[in-house]
Image (cartoon, rainbow, N blue to C red):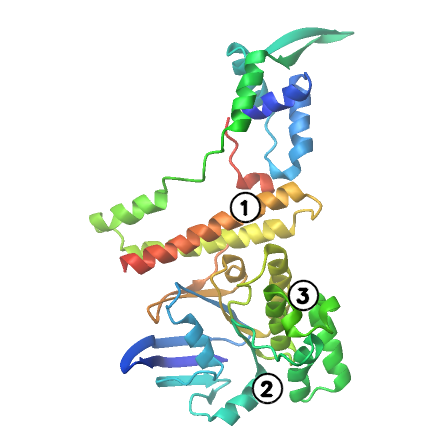
Amino acid sequence: MRPFLLALLAKEPAHGYELKQALEQIFGSAYPSPNIGQIYVTLGRLEKDGLVRAVDVEQSNRPNKKVYYLTAAGRDALDAWAEEPAEGPRVRDEFFMKLVLAPMTGIADRMTLINRQRRHYIALMRDLNELSERTDPADRVALLLIEGAMLHLQADLDWLDRCQEDLS
Amino acid sequence: MVNTVNLVKIYQSGGVPVPAVRGVDLRVEAGEFVAIMGPSGSGKSTLVHMLGGLDARTSGEIWLDGRRADTLGESAWALLRRQKIGFVFQFFNLIANMTVADNVELPALLAGASPREARERREHLLGALGLTGRADAAPAQLAGGEQQRVALARALANKPSLLLADEPTGNLDSRNTRDVLKLLTDVHRDGQTIILVTHDARVASLADRVVSLLDGQIVDDGAVGTFRRRPKGTAGDVVELRG
């Protein structure tokens, strides 16, 4: 969550609760809403690393609130995050480890493993279909995220076919 | 509805026998939606072509609605298709010198529908597939994805009790795929039997059952399960929050 908070603070200084609201507003249902404790813990770490700094702002008849702002080091970290290509999807696949190791132990044959995994992926896809249907069509961000998940799942299924062809 | 017994297809390629389907026993109940999956060359297309009488079996039996069908001649198959089977080909096979509207209405008219019924059915199907504006176009003027949807509309024009389809979403982008998925769901709900070949897991996930072929044989056959991790989940659940 660190870079997301840095990005929001690059826009304007904010206190913890405002950051939570901003994340919810921007991503809608496309992103699980983080709890406020998580946000404060992350802000604390960012502060310790010198990427953000906090100032106490006095409030009439309430305790002071801490408003966070980005430091120059925080700005550099944010730039580095934006410039770096994002990590690709999974490189190590747990199912593949199973596929390689299970037959060695004699506990399952590969065909059974592949078939079971395929059924699981198709059930997952059905779930994503239903999720996509009950998502507000105006929520483009959420729909794109679901579509991305579907495309990944399709790739996993195509790859199961390849495993089945080559290992049978 | 559909039943095959030890169904076999062997092609001859330069005097060499090439087995495509090697002993398939498949039983599909009326109203059931079955997806056939498997790698390319696993015999999926050959299987549905045989079920629609478009390819002759080498040995084995095909039963449709309790009647032996593999022994029928070409014209008897043609009649059967006109009455109760809709077929979506992988490469569309639209009639080039007829408009989209006429392509879709023709099977309904051949099956004995009145011109008005055929027109209403065509308007409904093209509407459901986002093709209303293309009714007067010639097939050659359409993009691949549009031709594919016209082919699906045509296959459904005579309200076939059995829909056979070979990769019906192979050329579609995700928005058009959504229209096709919705139409297939409606067709399934109406009680029509569907057997389709697909590598698209979104299509397969709508089915009651998925049959997996490998080297011309069924290697898996089972109901599509439900996966319930989050009864009221949102799109946010498809990503993991990394702290």
Which residue in the structure is indicated by mark 2? B82
Subunit of mark 1? Answer: A
Res. B114 image quadrant: bottom right
Which residue in the structure is indicated by mark 1? A148
C-alpha span from label 1 to label 3: 23 Å
| In-front residue for pair B54/A168 | B54
Residue A57 image position (x, y, % from top left): 71, 7
Which residue in the structure is indicated by mark 3? B129
Q: Is residue B233 visible?
A: no
Q: Is residue A13 above or below residue B156?
A: above
Q: Amino acid at mark 2?
A: Arg
Q: Residues within 10 Å of mark 1 (few under 14, many from 20)?
A: few
- 3 and 2 marks on the same chain: yes
Q: Residues within 10 Å of mark 3 (few under 14, many from 20)?
A: many
In the image: residue B184, left or right of residue A155: right
Q: Secondary structure at mark 3?
A: loop
Residue drawn at the location 35% of the way across and 84% of the way down: B60
